[in-house]
Amino acid sequence: MIIRCVVLLVSICCVLGTSIVRAQGAPATAAAFHRQWLAGLERQYPNLIYNPSFEVPSYLQPARVAEFWQDRPTTARDTETAHSGTTSLRLQPGTGYTFQTPMPIALIPGTAYTFSLWARTGAMTGKGVAIAYTQVKPAPRQLAITPWSGATTEWKQYQITFTTPADHVTGMIYLHFDLKEGDAAWVDDVCLQPTDGKVPSTPLPTITPNGGPSDGPATITLSTDLPGATIRYTTDGSDPTMHSWAYTRPLGLRYRATLKARVFHAGHREGPVATATFDVRPRTTGGVPFYPADWSQDVEAWWSRHIYNAKSPQPFTGPITSPTPRINVADVRDKHPNSTTGGIEEALAMLPVEGGTLWFPKDRGPYLISKPMEKLLTYGEGSASIIIKGRSNLHFLSDGAVISGTQINMFLFTSTEYAETKTQEQPITNFYFQNLVFDGGEQAENALYFKHSAQVLFDGCTFRNFVKKPKLSIHPAVLVAHTMTDNFWVRNCRFEGGFWHVYWDGVHEGGILNSYFGPNASQGGFLVMTNNDMAPLSPVQRTGQYIVVEGNTFDRCGRVAVCLSNSNTLVRNNTCTGTSNFIELYGRGRSSTYRGIVYNIYGNKVLDNTLTDVGTLALVMWNCVPPEGKMGTLIRGNTATNMHTILRIDPTHPDAEIHGVAVEGNTLSGKSLPQIRIRPDKLDRLQNIRVIGNTLRGTAQELVVELKGNTPVACEAVLVKDNAIEPAPAP
């Protein structure tokens, strides 16, 4: 008989889809979610198993660690049957299936352990269940196994005792079952413990350096002397748990933070937490400048001192120093007349691993990329004609040369660190693009796609002729950043086509400055998403934030100028003409991977923008609820002519609530008074919506109405106060 193996003790790997509808029984708030999740993180010593009674809901998928249980098609949590508590694990019919830890666990050598669980089956024709422990290293060896249980109509405990050899390194726990059609078995109260009940504590890890100031990203090393142990760490002020990121290599800390670290070992109880505070300071040398976020600051305060802000106390005025050697791409292409990348790949191959600069002379362009796309497994699948994997310090400079493409995606830059090590602390860094024209030839969907990158700057570049109706791209836009890409900036650039012009998903500390978004986009100018499910218990890292959109021109650039589902974004001093909506707020709601997590929108500011022929100032949809103590969305000081709607509030999804939107001190005019339009059947989902102290010009009409703008709606959650109502301006 062929024995089939299926994982049991573990973590996440299955993605649960993208719907934001609340999972059955899921907690309604992030706080409730954390309480339930943390309950599953606590071991009840001397038992070394996490969540031994399956009480933590299955939608709280834990991180990839051996000590957790994982759902599979042949198992399900059962809240109708339990040996203790309210839940057990029900095993579905299957013959010869084996459940095991997906990765070996390290127990203490030369130690006696007892492994047990309670099981019941009812009447059955299969063999039942059995449990075993097998050494993996240094040599595979079964240390203990029970006979098959047979039918056990009442709960019965099954137990094995084994002693790890003196040279023991790792082993695996197995739960076998053999169930015929119509059979069922339940297991509960799993226990792995030292036979003498003594569980030693892990030692304090070492953090090097132990805090202090650092220019630019701080490089930090964590270490422990305990063999087989894992160090886990956080940078958001919380104590590390089994869900926290595992340390695998020196960390590159890119913001001011307090780092906490703790040692974890399957045979030990969690020990003390080591703490070090790092003051990561700005850096303007060595390529693309670096400026850290301060997570305690308001985005406007952070931007007021940023080195890219011309009005800050110490603005960076350049020049940017590019790395050597510098290679002329035209010369390389001439030596490779059959190149399908315009000489770019051949030039990149000539640069050392430390990096360098590619020069594209305009008078010898264009540089045509016709190479068929290649696929690369990163966080999600990436594909492009030119894939730059794991390389940093690359500058692409020109005096106006054109790089054109005939494939769907032209460039992909990725560290692949998350795919390989499940960490996100060492992105590829230092990419500078100056005075280049990227031409999609009405065939390309993406010009450049960045995954897990940092210190990226586009200066004076143009993007044109990109596809408006994408066929392949998951993130269809001309310029895309994804998966913890930090310090990403676009200055003085021009966008003239595409589905979206710019699409950022999981970006921190970036912005679009003094750029032009033209009319040839089918969706809009700038889409910012908050998606970073790879950091489930770190709101700081999970929520894309500290984004600045300032001094830009949005010229009939599709449906919307700026679309946000993130936090701490400043949209200020922009001009916009001829879009349906200026701002759209789409709170993401629940994570698509960790269904218990709720993503919040907070701290966004829309200030001092000038709008003409824009239908709606702000469309607010999905889930937009600031957490306790955080400011919601502030819309203030904007001027608009020929506008029909101030706010359109439309919580369409069943899970959506919209709280904390303030519209203050704006001057808005149209043929009739701009209205507040809300979905009348969702009024109970609204809280603290304020429209106060604005000047509204136009012919008289009801201010608060349903979505079509006709029927008045009374809503206590919407406060309309102290607004100056004036006649429509003269034509």
Image (cartoon, rainbow, N blue to C red):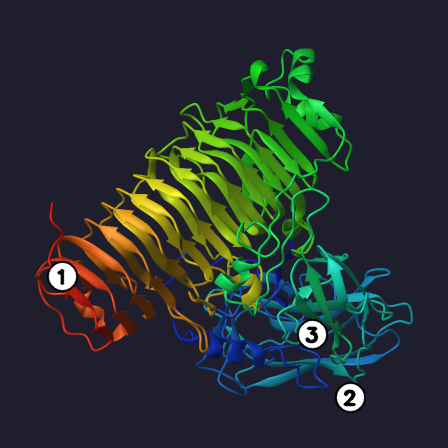
Query: What quarter of the picture does the C terminus occupy?
Result: top left
Kind of residue sitting beneath label 3: Pro
Pointer 3 or 2: first along the chain: 3
Q: Can residue 234 be seen in this snapshot?
A: no
Secondary structure of the residue carrying tag 2 is loop
Q: How crowded is the residue under tag 2: few (<14 C-alpha within 10 Å), some, or many (20+)?
A: few
Name which quarter of the figure residue 232 lies in.
bottom right
Q: Nearer the viewer, residue 46 or 178?
A: 46
Q: Is residue 516 above or below residue 138?
A: above
Q: Nearer the viewer, residue 537 or 136?
A: 537
Secondary structure of the residue carrying tag 1 is strand
Pointer 1 or 2: first along the chain: 2
Q: How many marks?
A: 3
Residues under numbered marks 1 and 2 in contact, where contact means CB atoms less than 8 Å apart = no
Mark whose residue sits in front, 1 or 2: 1
Secondary structure of the residue carrying tag 3 is loop
Residue at image point 8% right, 64% down = 711
* Rendering coords of residue 631 (x, y %): 42, 71
Mark whose residue sits in front, 3 or 1: 1
Q: Identify the residue under disc 3.
A: 147
